[in-house]
């Protein structure tokens, strides 16, 4: 058994090592848009390199993203939440695998349409986005803003619909936004150049284990500044909480 002097020396050494490691990193805070804030650590020797815990918060208090960077590369398991703190997805970066995807009811505000009439025997899977149904879809809402100002934005009188066309290869092929209200019906085809490359990548829908083209329709509300925001489940009252399913549907506009 080590004597007291040896134990004291070990504790001092460990303390110095820990202190030296903590001094190698600097905590940074970065505002991402109006509502999101990132908190992460960077190398003291090069503040452009993220290293250690990375988190994003909604309105500075609701944890939305949590994961680890190692020399500017994501590693390990990343977790994605909605603003209510519900875990929406767990993704293993190293294995490129979605470990967990939260249950989705029809009140989620997401619909999935394929250009094939389905039968009861068909086995289908919906398209998936890394980041889950909240965080993963924020970039598509963020690039749109209504072209004029209205006193009634945020009143609940206006709703938006984002349509994403996903190819069998899992690529975003087209995007359209429609805003409707008492005196408005406006459709806008969005340029995909406004999105980052990672925002154009999906896990495609399948029918009987074969990848197929699929449209994701996201029902949104128009917030107070004329932007789009996802509906909370409890905001879509009157919609049954049954599991969603892929429907047959064709849109000639795409």
Image: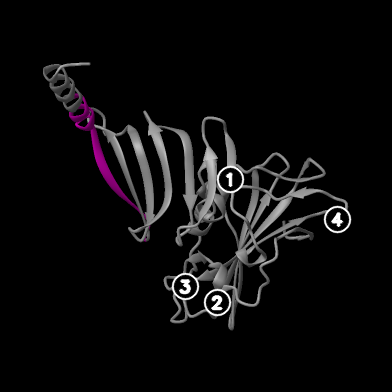
Report the residue marked by disc 1: 100
Colouring scheme, one of rainbow, by chain, secondary structure, one colour: one colour
**Earlier along the polypeptide chain: callout 3 or callout 1?**
1
Q: Residue furthest front?
A: 1
Measure how far apart labels 3 and 1 are at the Cα level: 40 Å
Q: Secondary structure at mark 4?
A: loop
> What separation in Å lies between label 4 and label 2 (alpha carbons)?
33 Å
Residue at the disc numbered 2: 158
- Location of residue 9 in the rendering, given as x and y in whole percent from the top left corner: 14, 19
The crowding category of the residue bearing disc 3, from other C-alpha atoms within 10 Å (few below 14, some 14 to 19, many at least 20), is few
Picture layout, residue 75 above or below residue 127:
above
Any mark on residue 118, and which? 4
Say which element carries label 2: loop
Instruction: Kindly report which numbered mark, 3 or 1, lies closer to the viewer in this rendering.
Output: 1
- For marks 3 and 4, give the CA distance: 41 Å
Q: Nearer the viewer, residue 191 or 78?
A: 78
Q: Residue furthest bottom?
A: 182
How much space separates mark 4 and mark 1, taking CA atoms?
27 Å
Q: Give how far across and how far down residue 233 sits, in percent.
A: 57, 68
Mark whose residue sits in front, 4 or 2: 4
Q: Residue at x 51, y 49 (%)?
A: 194
Q: Is residue 57 left or right of residue 7?
A: right
């Amino acid at each position: 058994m080590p004597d007291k002097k040896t134990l004291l020396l070990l504790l001092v050494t460990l303390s110095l090592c820990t202190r030296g490691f903590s001094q190698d990193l600097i905590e940074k805070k970065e505002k991402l848009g109006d509502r999101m804030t990132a908190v992460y650590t960077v190398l003291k020797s090069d503040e452009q390199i993220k290293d250690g815990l990375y988190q994003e918060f909604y309105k500075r208090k609701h944890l939305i993203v949590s994961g680890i960077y190692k020399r500017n590369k994501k590693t390990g398991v990343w977790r994605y939440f909605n603003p209510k703190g519900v875990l929406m997805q767990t993704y293993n970066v190293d294995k490129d695998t979605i470990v967990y995807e939260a249950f989705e009811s029809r009140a989620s505000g997401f619909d999935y349409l394929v250009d094939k009439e389905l039968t009861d025997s068909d086995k289908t899977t919906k398209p998936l986005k890394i980041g889950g149904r909240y965080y993963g879809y924020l970039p598509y809402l963020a690039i749109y803003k209504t072209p004029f100002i209205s006193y009634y934005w945020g009143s609940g009188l206006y709703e938006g619909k984002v349509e994403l066309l996903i190819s069998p290869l899992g690529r975003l092929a087209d995007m359209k936004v429609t805003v409707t209200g008492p005196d408005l019906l406006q459709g806008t085809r969005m340029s995909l150049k406004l999105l980052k490359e990672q925002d154009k990548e999906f896990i495609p829908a399948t029918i009987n284990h074969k990848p197929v083209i699929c449209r994701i329709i996201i029902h949104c509300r128009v917030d107070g500044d004329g932007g789009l925001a996802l509906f909370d489940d409890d905001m879509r009252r009157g919609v049954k909480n049954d599991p969603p399913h892929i429907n047959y549907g064709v849109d000639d506009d795409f």
